[in-house]
Image (cartoon, rainbow, N blue to C red):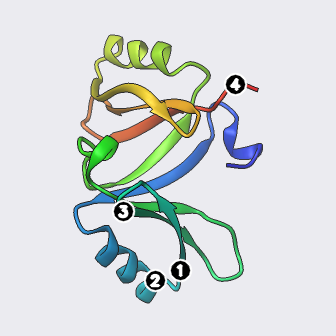
């Protein structure tokens, strides 16, 4: 994420988490023209999707490990100052926590559903 996409209130990233990340990665390479960069997850790779001549704009991830509970949707990650506080506000405002707050890329995230059922993620970047 750049400095501009790590400010509270901005969209920091997009991810798609699916059972067949390799096949879906190939689909988006063919349909959109993305290339990919491997992100080692130990026993397998997830992928950063890169437009022609550009920088990574999204991820395609396997639905396993830390992503086992993430639904198979294009997930937008909204940047927040404090993910735990925002998660509490979510439930107080009638939303639901889909994935409890936990670590991600040096920061923290959770997955929520708003009162209408729409799903998104909240992301707190690492301090500093």
The answer to whether the residues at label 1 and label 2 have Cβ atoms under 8 Å apart is: yes
Q: Which residue is tagged 4?
A: 127
Q: Along the horizontal axis of the image, is 21 left or right of 104?
A: left
Q: On the rendered structure, is 84 left or right of 128? A: left
x and y, in percent, of residue 87 in the image: 41, 19
Label 3 vs label 2: CA separation? 19 Å
N-terminal label among 2 and 4: 2
> Which residue is at 55% across, 40% downward?
105
What is the spatial separation of the Cα atoms under label 2 and label 4, in whole angstroms?
34 Å
The residue under label 2 is: 29
Q: Please state which of residues 113 and 83 is positioned toward the viewer in this rendering.
A: 83
Earlier in the chain: of badge 4 and badge 3, it is 3
Give the residue displayed 64% in from the left and 83% down from the top: 52
Q: Residues within 10 Å of mark 3 (few under 14, many from 20)?
A: few
Which is in the foreground here, disc 3 or disc 2?
3
Crowd class of label 2 (few under 14; some 14 to 19; many from 20; radius 10 Å):
some
Contact between marks 1 and 4 (CB within 8 A): the answer is: no
Q: Earlier in the sequence, mark 1 or mark 2?
A: 2
Q: Is residue 117 above or below residue 80?
A: below
Q: Secondary structure at mark 3?
A: loop
Which residue is more in the foreground, 124 or 11? 124
Which residue occupies the extreme front position in the image?
Answer: 43
Q: Which residue is mark 1?
A: 34
Q: Residue at left 50%, top 61%? A: 39
């Amino acid at each position: 994420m750049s400095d501009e996409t790590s400010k509270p209130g901005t969209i920091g990233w997009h991810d798609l988490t699916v059972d067949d990340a390799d096949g879906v990665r190939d689909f988006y390479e063919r349909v959109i023209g993305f290339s990919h960069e491997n992100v080692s997850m130990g026993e397998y790779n997830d992928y950063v999707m890169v437009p022609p001549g550009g920088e990574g704009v999204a991820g395609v991830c396997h639905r396993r490990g830390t992503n086992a509970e993430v639904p198979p949707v294009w997930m937008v990650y909204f940047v927040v100052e404090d993910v735990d506080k925002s998660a509490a506000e979510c439930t107080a405002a009638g939303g639901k926590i889909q994935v409890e707050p936990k670590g991600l890329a040096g920061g923290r995230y959770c997955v929520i559903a708003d009162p209408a059922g729409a799903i998104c993620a909240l992301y707190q970047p690492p301090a500093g």
